[in-house]
């Protein structure tokens, strides 16, 4: 037996996904991300006594960055965000709040 041909409707193709006007809403489990200013970035690096190359990286296209309104405003204004630090605050059962820092690097697509 041969497989039966799949029938498709002859109606017009769908126009594609509808773009939502709703701003990005973070998942409740996603910790808040905060892009630091260049001055704050320098102060943190001095406080940590480490070069930025030794810190973990975060892609410019990471969805967690979209939780920071400052990030979206800076990105829309065309400011260069590469090399800036991001502060991520997570709740911790032992320390109360755990703070992590990441360095923004370019996305794979060259964004």
Image: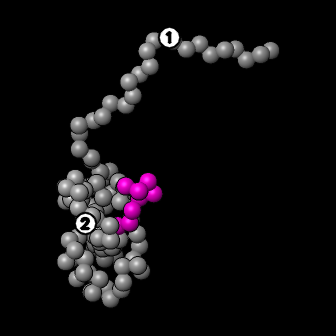
* 42 to the left or right of 55: left
User: Residue 22, percent across and down?
Assistant: 23, 39
User: Residue 87, percent across and down?
Assistant: 28, 70
Q: Residue at x 22, y 82 (%)?
A: 43
Q: State the image quarter where residue 89 is shown.
A: bottom left
Q: Quadrant of the N terminus?
A: top right
Q: How is the image coloured?
A: one colour
Q: Which residue reaches farthest top?
A: 10
Q: State the image quarter where residue 99 is shown.
A: bottom left
Which residue position is annotated with label 1? Answer: 10
Nearer the observer, disc 1 or disc 2?
A: 1
Q: Nearer the viewer, residue 100 or 79?
A: 79
Which residue position is annotated with label 2? Answer: 35
| SS under mark 2 | strand
Q: Is residue 21 above or below residue 12?
A: below
Residue 94 part of the magenta-drawn span: no
Residue 88 visible here = no
Q: Is residue 34 above or below residue 16?
A: below
CA distance separating discs 1 and 2: 50 Å
Q: Which mark is residue 97?
A: none
* 73 to the left or right of 33: left
Start and end of the magenta stretch?
104-111
Count of marks overlaid on the render: 2
Residue 110 visible here = yes
Q: State the image quarter where residue 21 is shown.
A: top left
Rate crowding at label 2 as few (under 14), some (14 to 19) or many (20 or more) other CA atoms within 10 Å: many
């Amino acid at each position: 037996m041969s497989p039966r041909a799949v029938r498709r409707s002859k109606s017009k193709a769908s126009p594609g996904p509808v773009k939502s006007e709703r701003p990005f809403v973070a998942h409740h489990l996603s910790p808040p991300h905060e892009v630091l200013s260049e001055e704050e970035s320098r102060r943190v690096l001095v406080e940590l006594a480490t070069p930025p190359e030794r810190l973990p990286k975060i892609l410019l296209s990471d969805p967690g960055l979209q939780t920071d309104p400052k990030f979206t405003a800076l990105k829309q204004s065309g400011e260069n965000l590469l090399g800036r630090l991001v502060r991520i605050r997570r709740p911790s059962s032992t320390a109360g709040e755990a703070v992590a820092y990441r360095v923004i690097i370019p996305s794979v697509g060259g964004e």
